[in-house]
Image (spheres, rainbow, N blue to C red):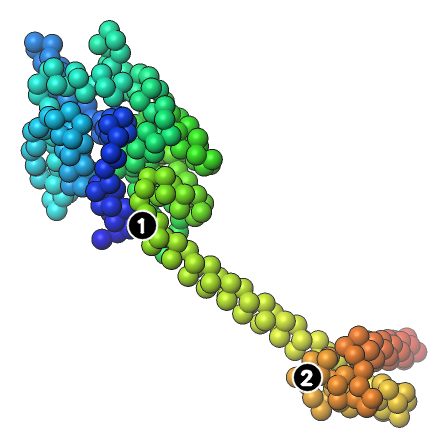
Amino acid sequence: MSFSKDVKDELSRQLSPARHCQIAEIAALISLCGRIMITEKDSYILKIQTENVTVARKYFTLIKKTFNINTEISIKQNAYLKMSKMYSLSITDHEMALKILQATKLIDENKEIGENLSIMSNLVIQNSCCKRAFIRGAFLAAGSISDPEKTYHFEIVAPNEAKAKQLQAIINSFDMDAKIVIRKKYYVVYVKEGSQIVDLLNIMEAHVSLMNLENVRILKEMRNSINRQVNCEAANINKTVTAATKQIEDILYIKDQIGFSELTEGLEEIAILRTEYPEASLKELGALLSPPIGKSGVNHRLRKISILADNLREQKEEVNYGSKENID
């Protein structure tokens, strides 16, 4: 089972004790995966369709618990995905359908249905607890979360811009930073920050999934921290080796050109030690001297050797250039 399915399975078993929160969650479910059918007699049939059995179970439970209405259920094989089933839950009684639409504010006092089943009034999501329930219902109806082992991504797909903006505003009322992107003909409300997805799971009251995500985040952060430390140490080792190689090249060049006898006692001592201990750090080289000196002192002496080697190279180039001119 995917992480997203785990979250939905947990949320399908989460039932708010307050009726107003139950209505808010029903409103989200109908708004995002429901539709109204009008018969020849101008009566309403309220219907939702979903491929997720947990969503179907949650909607059935909420309708029964909140309105004491039994929902008709039919199951069909998905024509496009043979391994998948389509669950249809219908309320064919006009008065019952009307009662639910009025309670969820999906219809106004004149019995006009909101465009695309948009909520006509924000009264259904006025309280903070109802907003939590609405987000939970919206996620169950049209949401998904990526596998946190791979990446952090939370999204809810809305059929139009108005619903997307309404959902974005509700999520952002909890100090989130939800954004909207257009994907084909849909509007996707999404959050990509790992810590905010954790907060959203808490808002929806998916506490088990929250702990599972936090465990993954902790392990990933530990791995990233170790990798950064290893990379840093590798970079430092590479830098030390490169510097030591250049220092040894300079020392050997001086030895070949003028010998160590031309060096001061301090420079000769550090030159010999560097060739004997090519992998030693500056601090370790300083400790081998008698008397010992610090890292900066060793670096100062090696820099002097480098300057001397560069000067000798320049002098040799000038001599070679002058010889060439005489020949010409």
Q: Nearer the viewer, residue 186 or 7?
A: 7
The residue that appears at 9% across and 39% down in the rendered structure is: 77
**Residue type (three-letter) at the residue carrying disc 2:** Ala
The residue that appears at 35% across and 49% down in the rendered structure is: 210
Q: Secondary structure at mark 2?
A: loop
Q: CA distance from mark 1 to mark 2?
A: 50 Å
Q: Position of residue 38 (x, y in %)?
A: 13, 14
Circle 1 is placed at which residue position? 209
Mark with earlier residue (1, 2): 1
Q: How many marks?
A: 2
Is residue 39 left or right of 26 when viewed as pictured? left
Q: Position of residue 159 (x, y in %)?
A: 30, 27
Q: Position of residue 300 (x, y in %)?
A: 83, 76
Q: Secondary structure at mark 1?
A: helix
**Residue type (three-letter) at the residue carrying disc 1:** Ser
Residue 4, placed above or below residue 67: below
The residue that appears at 14% across and 33% down in the rendered structure is: 60
Circle 2 is placed at which residue position? 280
Residue 192 placement: quadrant: top left
Q: Furthest-front residue in view? A: 17
- Which corner quadrant holds the C terminus? bottom right
Asked if residue 293 can be seen in this view, the reply is yes
Is residue 263 left or right of 276 when viewed as pictured? right
Residue 181 placement: quadrant: top left
What label sits on residue 289 in the rendered view? none
